[in-house]
Image (spheres, rainbow, N blue to C red):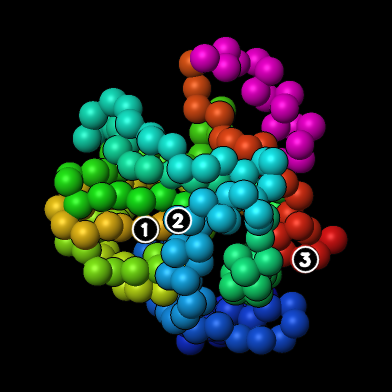
Amino acid sequence: MHHTKLEDHKNGITTSRKGNQFRFTSPIPGVHIYDNIWPDSMDFIDKIDSDNFWETEASSEDVKWIREDYLDEEHGKRSKTCWIQAHSEITDAFEEVIDSYIAHWNLDPHSRESMRITKFEGKGEFFGMHSDDSFATPRTTSMVYYPNDDYEGGELEFIHFGVKIKPKARQLFLFPSAYNLEHKVTPVTSGTRITFVSFFNQLTFQERDARTKLLNPNEYYQPKPQYVLRKSFLGME
C-alpha cells in the first residue's frame, strides 16, 4: 500500500477516484464502517413494500419478496428477501463510498451480484455462521448496509475475532468476503432488521461460469439474479 494510503488508513479515511474523502472506523482489519450513508433509505424501503414499485419500476430481472428459510440457527437462515439488479437511488447512495474502499485496497472487481434486501423479523429470525466467499459463490468484497436500528437482537458477530456489533442506522459495512471473516446474525427478538447486501467479485463472468459448471447446481446456493457488470453499479468502465 502506498505511504499516503497508509497515512489515510491511520486517520480512518478513504478517498474516491473523484477525490472525495469518507471517514470510517475499523473494528477488524479490512472491515470499514461508514456512518450516515443514504439518509432517505427507509423511504426506499417503503417504496419496495408497495405493489406499485414491482409493477412500474422493477425490471424483469428483479425478484419480489420471497422467504429464505433453511437449516438451523447454527448454519441456516430465516428471513424474507428481494433482489434488485440496478436502481438509480441505490447507485447514487453507495457508488462513491464503495469506490473509495476499492481504490484504498487496490481492488479490481469485474462483476457484482444484484442487490439483495433482507428483512429479519422479530420472531427469532437469524442468519447462521457463514463466510461470504466459497468455490460455488466466489466473492472478494462484501457490502452490507443498515437503514434502521429500531429492533432488538440482530447483532453482527465476527466469529474468529470475538467481535459483536449492533449496527447503527445508516451505516455501511465493507469488508473482505474471506473465510477468516466468518460471521453470523444473532436472532432478532423484536422489530425488523433490514439490510442491503451485495458482493463484488474479481472473477470475470467466464471464469465464474467455468467454475460453477464443475458443480451440481442442486447442491449449492446460486445467487439470483445473475451478476451484473461493475460499471452498471459504480458508473465506471
Above-or-below relation of 138 to 105:
above
Q: Which mark is residue 49?
A: 2
- Spatial CA distance of label 3 from label 2 is 27 Å
Above-or-below relation of 137 to 26:
above
Q: Secondary structure at mark 3?
A: loop
Question: Which class describes the residues within 10 Å of circle 1: few (<14), some (14-19), or many (20+)?
Answer: many
- Spatial CA distance of label 3 from label 1 is 26 Å
Is residue 214 found inside the magenta-colored segment of the image?
yes
Q: Residue furthest right?
A: 237
Above-or-below relation of 133 to 194:
above
Question: Which class describes the residues within 10 Å of circle 3: few (<14), some (14-19), or many (20+)?
Answer: few
N-terminal of the pair, mark 2 or mark 1, is 2
Identified by mark 1, the residue type is: Ile
**Which-is-in-front pick, marks 3 and 2?**
2
**Which-is-in-front pick, marks 3 and 1?**
1
| Region in magenta | 201-218
Identified by mark 3, the residue type is: Gly
Q: Position of residue 163 (x, y in %)?
A: 25, 60
**Which-is-in-front pick, marks 2 and 1?**
2
**Residue receiving disc 1:** 194
**Residue receiving disc 3:** 235
